[in-house]
Image (cartoon, rainbow, N blue to C red):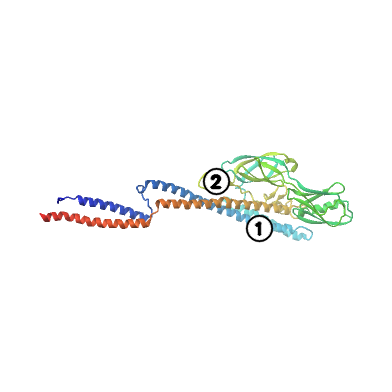
Amino acid sequence: MAITVNNSNTLNLLGILNKTAQAQSTTLTRMSTGQRINAGKDDPAGLIALRALDAESTATNAAISNNQRTNAMLDVADGALKEVESLLTDIETLVAGSVGDQISDSEKAANQAQIDMAVESIDRIVRTTTFNGKHMLNGQLGIQVSEATGKAEDLRLYSRNPSSSSQDLSVSVTTASSSAALSTTNSATGAMTYTVTGSLGSATIEISDTDALADEIAKINAATSQTGVSAAAGAGNGINFSSVETGSDQFVSIDMISGGGSAGWVDTHVENGSDAVVTVNGQSAAADGNKVSFSANGVSGSFTLTATGDVDAATMTLSVSGGGATFQLGTDSSTRSTMGINSMFSHTLGRSGTGFLSEVKSGGSHQLNASGTKALAIVKEAMADVAEARGRIGGFQKYQVQTSINSLEASAKGLADAKGVINDVDYATETAEMNRQNVLMTAGMQLLGVASQQSGQVLQLL
């Protein structure tokens, strides 16, 4: 090989050193940021995939936050309803303890005063329970529904299709419910004692030698609030017993304790009522007496059929017109769900056929000293309403919100893992690469020095 003076070796070495320096800079950037892709040129296809995963991950984290807020909102409603339940328990105790002649008028008045304060507290809780400016229990979040013929009352919807605010449901009543009823031919003479038992409890009826049939019936009806059973004159100097409410869980039982002796009396004679048979949009609905619960075409709710004779073989239409609380459970609009939280004010707790909690207050038609008061039955209906509301809120939290959170958290973890596979730096690999680049840089610098000495050696020859 000829000995010449040129800078080709130097230029080659400088080019190699520049490439090594660029690779060293890329490695340092990756190690300092912890990311494999810091510019589009690092991995164009990987960058596209990474940005798509970033968008999905952002939406998933936002959905998790939404569900956590939904949980907090419903916790507020449940906590308020729990306090309402406690107040209703106190009211039930006061009402049950005010039945009978063993309670003086002053004691009954004191109990009535406590009931009034408890009912006022319930209304205050309902009026003031809010979350982020929204009233939770005053009916603001209730789903709007109506029925034009008046054959259904106490209409309450618990959920509806979030994509359609207006919807009609066709209701068909095959058979209305019936009361439990039995009749006796009471021809017994002399004193006798027996118990009358119904869905609310039992009462002992004591008949003296001088009591007429009308007196006996009056004593039975005086205990109706305790038993849920009323009486009327029947055929053959007998008595027709019937439950005040209708349904298969209503019953009438007569147990003779002493006296009697007539063939018309049958000890432990029990008769049950029957539930209504109803379909909603062609699907069978559950009925408890005339109270109907249904779930059809994305709508769930309940209503009470009116007087039995008016609804046999009746048809009607429930018209849904929006309302409710809509929550987005996932990352897009298809995951929305709308639930209704109905009014919990005292004038809405109860049923039309029985009465409402506000009527148990002083001056109400079912206050403690009112004739034929149904205070105990009303309080039990109110407690059932609150328990149902808590159960539905809790069910939505457990089976909708919490399951969504669990699913979204699993998705978020999977997305984070996928992003890590694409973009996370392998520090072991990059460290090894940095050591290799340092060796190459050191060797290149030393060889550049050798190339520079070559020209000096030619001058020595001259």
Q: Secondary structure at mark 1?
A: helix
Q: Position of residue 323 (x, y in %)?
A: 59, 44
Furthest-front residue in this view:
1
Q: Position of residue 455 (x, y in %)?
A: 15, 54
Tag count in the figure?
A: 2
Q: Quadrant of residue 195?
A: bottom right
Q: Quadrant of residue 121?
A: bottom right
Rendered image: mark on residue 246: none
Vertical placement of residue 92 versus 171, above or below: below
Sooner in the amino-acid sequence: mark 2 or mark 1: 1
Q: Amino acid at mark 1?
A: Ser
Apparent side of residue 381 relative to residue 462 in the rendered image (left or right): right
Foreground mark, 2 or 1? 2
Q: What residue did someone put label 1 on? A: 86
Q: Nearer the viewer, residue 114 or 84?
A: 84
Q: What residue did someone put label 2 on? A: 336
Q: Amino acid at mark 2?
A: Arg
Tell me the CA gap for discs 2 and 1: 33 Å
Q: Position of residue 176 (x, y in %)?
A: 73, 43
